[in-house]
Image (spheres, grey):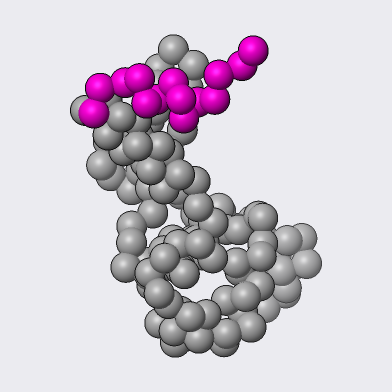
Amino acid sequence: MAVPLSKMIQQFSVDDQADVRRQAQELVAEHRSLTQIRKALKLTQTDLADALGTSQANVAQIEQKSDLMVSTLERVVRAMGGELQLVVTIPRQGRVVLELGKTKGRTIVRPKARRTASPRSTSRRRLATA
């Protein structure tokens, strides 16, 4: 016969019971939606919209999306007073904080694409100089 988890936990020392409760709270806190975070901070969608300089309807749409741009997510988190960190879990490596667009503390600067002259614009230049 199965023993309920609560009965098993009662057999732990008081310190161990407190540790289990603390770890459970941390796990619950780690997995929250934007809506849950906003509500935990006692913010309305209108409050968040004002901080973002957008409409309440736009905030509602953002909260319902399952695929957000990272920049949008970062703006929303900052507007709530937080800091966005992306954590990657890699087998045999553990958890790693991902820094987008940065290498060794420096932002990656991508070279601008070179514009090649189209045959049409080249022939115009030739005509203008002739």
Is residue 65 rendered to the left or right of residue 80?
right
Q: Please, which residue is most extreme toward the right here?
A: 120
Q: Is residue 32 above or below residue 36?
A: above
Inspect the magenta stretch and tell me whether residue 2 lies in it. yes
Q: Residue at position x 57%, y 76% from top?
A: 59
Q: Is residue 37 above or below residue 20?
A: below
Residue 29 in view (yes/no): yes
Inspect the magenta stretch and tell me whether residue 7 lies in it. yes
Looking at the picture, tell me which residue is in the foreground, 12 or 83.
12
Which image quarter holds the N terminus? top right
Looking at the picture, tell me which residue is in the foreground, 32 or 23.
23
Is residue 7 rendered to the left or right of residue 20?
right
Q: How many marks?
A: 0
Q: Residue at position x 37%, y 41% from top?
A: 26
Q: Residue at position x 66%, y 65% from top?
A: 64
Q: Residue at position x 28%, y 44% from top?
A: 106
Q: Is residue 112 above or below residue 25?
A: below
Q: Provide residue 75's location: percent of width, then percent of height.
A: 43, 67
Q: Provide residue 21's location: percent of width, then percent of height.
A: 35, 37
Q: Provide residue 29's location: percent of width, then percent of height.
A: 41, 48
Looking at the picture, tell me which residue is in the foreground, 113 or 13.
13
Q: Provide residue 37's location: percent of width, then percent of height.
A: 45, 62
Q: Where is residue 123, by image quadrant?
A: bottom right
Numbered range of the magenta stretch: 1-14
Looking at the picture, tell me which residue is in the foreground, 68 or 3.
3
Is residue 75 rendered to the left or right of residue 64?
left
Q: Where is residue 47, by image quadrant?
A: bottom left
Residue 101 in view (yes/no): no
